[in-house]
Structure formats: C-alpha cells, structure tokens
Image (tube, helix red, strand yellow):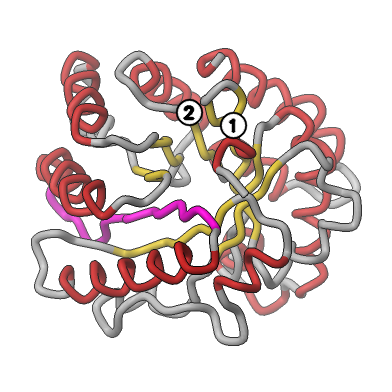
C-alpha cells in the first residue's frame, strides 16, 4: 500500500465523502433523524459512481461506504483512504483524545484494501488538550507503521473566534504535526479568506506550510462555496500544495437534490467542477 495509489504523478485529486452522521444535519437540518442509513449509502454511491472516475482517490469510512462501495462502484484503479476516528466528540473536542471507531482498527483498514488510513484530529496548538491529541495521533501512527499502512492525518482547528489568528494556528499546527512523520497532511486554508482577501498573504501563508512540511499536504474544503475553494486551491497549488481533498464545497448541491435528480446534478454541475479543480493540480 502506498499514498501514490491516491495520486497521479504526485498530485492528489481526492473526492472526500467520508462524512458520517454530520451528513444527516446537512440533508435534513430540521429533522436529521429522518435520514436513514440507506439514504446516506445511496448518496455516497451516486457520488462515487458519478465522480470517482475523474478523481485520483476517494476518502471512505467503515459505516456507509466500506464495504458497501467496494462492490465495483469504486473503480478499481482509484485508491481510497479508510477513516479511523470515532465520531461524537465534535460537540466537545476537549472531552477526550481522538480514538478509533468502536469495532474498527488499523488492521481492518489495511485488510479492506485501503491505500492509506485517515485520522481526523480536532486540534488547537494553543490549548492544554493539544498534548493529549498529539500523543493519541502518535500512538495511532505507530500502529499504522506496525501494520504497514500509510496514514493521512487531518489536524483541524475548532472554536476559533478571531479570524486573524488563523494563519498562526494553522502554521503552529504544521510545526507540531509535520515532524511526527505522517505520510500526508490534510489541512485547512491557512487564511480566513472572508476576513483577509489579500491573495499575496494567502500565498505567503501557503508557502510557509510548504516550507515546514517534508511530506505532501493537501487542501481540504471545509464546507465553503465551490468558487471560494477554487480560488484558494489555485493559490495553494502555486505555493507548494500537492493537491486537494474536497468534500461538500464540490458536491453539496448534489446532496441536497432529490434522489431522482441527483445523477443529472452530478453530471451537469459537479463533474465539471471536479474537472476544473483537476486542471489546477495537473
């Protein structure tokens, strides 16, 4: 297994659909419980069937897409990551360190054929809880090394009320995680683009990430609009980023479309968007 299985010529164009229960709130914000397990599986099946052929990799998880989409829906030449982390601590990120999903393991991720495991770590380098998160991530990395599967880690800030602090928070996070030796870092854009529209500062912050990372880093989308993400990715790619791992900013409209209309939305709107992002990483 190799992270190269998620890339083409060292560039990552990865479709992120490893969302789980948070999708219920997206699909039915007034009544999340009305969204069934099968509704989520069906959405992910439509997204993978319509888009994975245009991606270099896909991010999956072991509740709604592994093994469900490994039935031929995912093209055999497209590598995938397998999410490791348990859910449930988003509401209180400092209640406990990140842990593996109950009943799942690094070995299970490797056994299902994943090109890499993936770990989301809610993280603030300026909080006391940071040390516990670093240790938990390091322990999981050690297990991945023992099993023989690469690890993509996503250290994601939370509770940041002052957007001017974002560049330093992201760069301090890179300083903590890059030396630990993860295979890929999946990172947020280091500048709040709504607060600071100066693309010169965007480029400087992205270049700083690249200078501090020996491993490739990819840009997550964070649920913003497609146009904003496209602009951010263009700057990031010119500043040393290795590609994208894009979620709802790409396919959000397809998720909200009636199921009968979803394939057309994917074909007419979402697939051309994916192609436009791929042009930036070619």
187 vs 275, left or right, is left
Query: In this picture, is 160 found above or below 22?
Result: above
Which numbered disc, 2 or 1, marks the residue closer to the eye?
1
Q: Is residue 187 left or right of residue 112?
A: left
In magenta, the rendered stretch is: 149-162
Q: Quadrant of the C terminus?
A: top right
Residue 138 x %, y % = 30, 67
Frontmost residue, 130 versus 192? 130
Percent across and percent down for residue 133 are: 26, 71
Residue 192 visible in image: yes
The residue drawn where x is 22% and y is 23% is 207
Say which residue appears at 24% left-offset and 67% top-offset: 134
Q: Please tell me which of labels 2 and 1 falls first in the chain.
A: 1
Describe residue 144's horizontal placement relative to residue 51 as left or right: left
Q: Which mark is residue 243?
A: 2
For image coordinates 19% across by 55% down, the residue present is 160
Please give the label number shown on residue 132: none
Quadrant of the rendered structure where residue 170 is? top left
Q: Look at the numbered disc 1 and give the secondary structure of its residue.
A: strand
Relative to 199, 30 lies left or right: right
Within-10-Å neighbours for mark 2: few <14, some 14–19, many 20+: many
Label 1: how many residues lie within 10 Å, few (<14), some (14-19) or many (20+)? some
Determine if residue 262 is in view.
no
Decide whether residue 56 is among the magenta residues: no
Q: Which mark is residue 7?
A: 1
Residue 57 position in % (x across, y down): 65, 39
C-alpha gap between disc 2 and disc 1: 9 Å
As helix, strand or loop, the secondary structure at mark 2 comes to strand
In this view, 48 is above or below 225: below
């Amino acid at each position: 297994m190799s992270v190269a299985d998620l890339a083409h010529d060292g560039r990552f164009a990865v479709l992120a659909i490893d969302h789980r229960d948070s999708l219920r709130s997206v699909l039915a914000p007034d009544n999340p419980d009305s969204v069934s397990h099968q509704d989520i599986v069906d959405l992910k099946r439509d997204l993978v069937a319509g888009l994975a052929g245009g991606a270099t990799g896909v991010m999956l998880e072991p509740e709604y897409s592994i093994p469900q989409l490994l039935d031929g829906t995912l093209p055999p030449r497209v590598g995938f990551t397998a999410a490791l982390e348990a859910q449930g601590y988003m509401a209180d990120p400092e209640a406990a360190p990140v842990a593996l999903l109950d009943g799942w393991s690094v070995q299970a991720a490797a056994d299902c054929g994943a090109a890499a495991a993936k770990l989301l770590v809610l993280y603030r380098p300026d909080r006391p809880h940071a040390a516990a998160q670093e240790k938990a991530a390091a322990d999981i990395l050690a297990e991945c090394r023992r099993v023989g599967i690469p690890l993509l880690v996503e250290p994601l800030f939370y509770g940041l009320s002052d957007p001017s602090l974002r560049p330093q928070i992201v760069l301090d996070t890179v300083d903590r995680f890059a030396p630990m030796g993860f295979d890929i870092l999946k990172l947020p854009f280091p500048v709040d683009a709504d607060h600071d529209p100066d693309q010169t500062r965007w480029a400087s912050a992205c270049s700083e990430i690249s200078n501090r990372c020996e491993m490739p880093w990819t840009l997550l989308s964070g649920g913003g609009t497609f146009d904003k993400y496209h602009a951010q990715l263009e700057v990031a790619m010119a500043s040393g980023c290795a590609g994208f791992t894009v979620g709802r900013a790409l396919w959000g409209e397809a998720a909200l479309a009636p199921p009968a209309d979803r394939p057309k939305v994917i074909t007419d709107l979402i697939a051309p968007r994916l192609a436009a992002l791929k042009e930036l990483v070619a």
